[in-house]
Amino acid sequence: MAILEVQNLTKNFGGLTALNDVSFKVGEGQIHGLIGPNGAGKSTMFKNIAGFYTPTRGDILFEGKSIKGQTPSRISMSGIVRTFQETTLFHEMTVFENVLVGTHNRSRTNIFSAIIGLDRLIQQQARTSAMKVLEFMGLGDRKHQLASELPLGSQRALAIAIALVSEPKLMLMDEPFAGMNPEETRGMMQLTRKVRESGVTIVLVEHDMKAVMGLCDQLTVLNFGTLLAGGSPEQVRNNPDVINAYLGGSHHV
Ligand SMILES: Nc1ncnc2c1ncn2[C@@H]1O[C@H](COP(=O)(O)OP(=O)(O)OP(=O)(O)O)[C@@H](O)[C@H]1O
Ligand SMILES: [Mg+2]
């Protein structure tokens, strides 16, 4: 079953067409790669799915229902989270505090819960789930460190931990491997698989072809905002259009 279905999506910015009539489906429980050269429209696709942009045309179905035009907070409440291409950690806060901030996506305390003493309970639950997620991502020992003190691999793991604490069904990951050395890449591949095994479907935008080919069940290839190819990593690797338009350049599969 498709957990996410993008139907004929077009996104215009003034005269520029960043996405042009793109359709693809993401199967539940899969790691689905969304690849393509710089400027192909990958991050724009994520921003449309997450509600930061409204599609010009087309539709986006999550669990069979349209989410087009919904606010980012409503979309995240229904179970879609995004990790960002640019770093979004609070560098002067500890690892634990960073994840605690992520719990506010789902638990809203208010004056009534304060009166009946519920907010203390909610805060306790938030701390417990923050700690659980940190352990899961292998960051338990680093919880008191400042985010700025972490090596790159752990900073990326923390960004995923923050996304995970809201208990998503679908995670949109934008270039989690960028700038990593081979050892960090291996670690992040293991973590990505672990997240999927916990029941979260993943859409992965990534230029690191080793990571993409090693992780993904299915691929969607964009080029200049249009759908170039789709299929298994093997099919995409051997598709002449992909080789010419994308992989023939400085990229290698
Ligand atoms: N807010 C915006 N306003 C105008 N143009 C935009 C906007 N956001 C993106 N674009 C344009 O849309 C196109 C697609 O950009 P996008 O960031 O989605 O590419 P990408 O595939 O994520 O590239 P990269 O691999 O470099 O991250 C580019 O031509 C970009 O300049
Ligand atoms: Mg991008």
Image (spheres, rainbow, N blue to C red):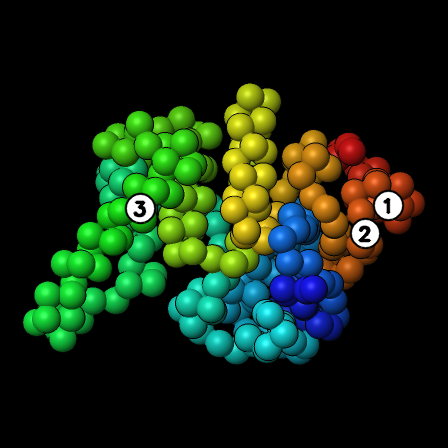
> Which of 158/44 is in front?
158
If you read the primary sequence from the N terminus, does the residue marked by circle 3 or circle 2 appear first? 3
Residue at image mark 3: 130
Q: Secondary structure at mark 3?
A: helix
Q: Secondary structure at mark 2?
A: strand
Q: Assess disc 2: are there few (<14), some (14-19) or many (≥20) residues with their C-alpha within 10 Å of its C-alpha.
A: some
Residue at image mark 2: 231
If you read the primary sequence from the N terminus, does the residue marked by circle 3 or circle 1 appear first? 3
Taking the image as drawn, is residue 98 in sight?
Answer: no
Horizontal side of residue 149 vs 112, given as left or right: right
Snapshot quadrant of residue 74: bottom left
Residue at image mark 1: 235
Amino acid on which the number 2 mark rests in the picture: Gly
Amino acid on which the number 3 mark rests in the picture: Ala
Could you say where residue 39 lies in the image, as x and y percent from the top left? 65, 52
Figure check: 198 above or below 109: above
Q: Residue at x 55, y 51 (%)?
A: 199
Residues under labels 3 and 2: Cα distance?
A: 36 Å
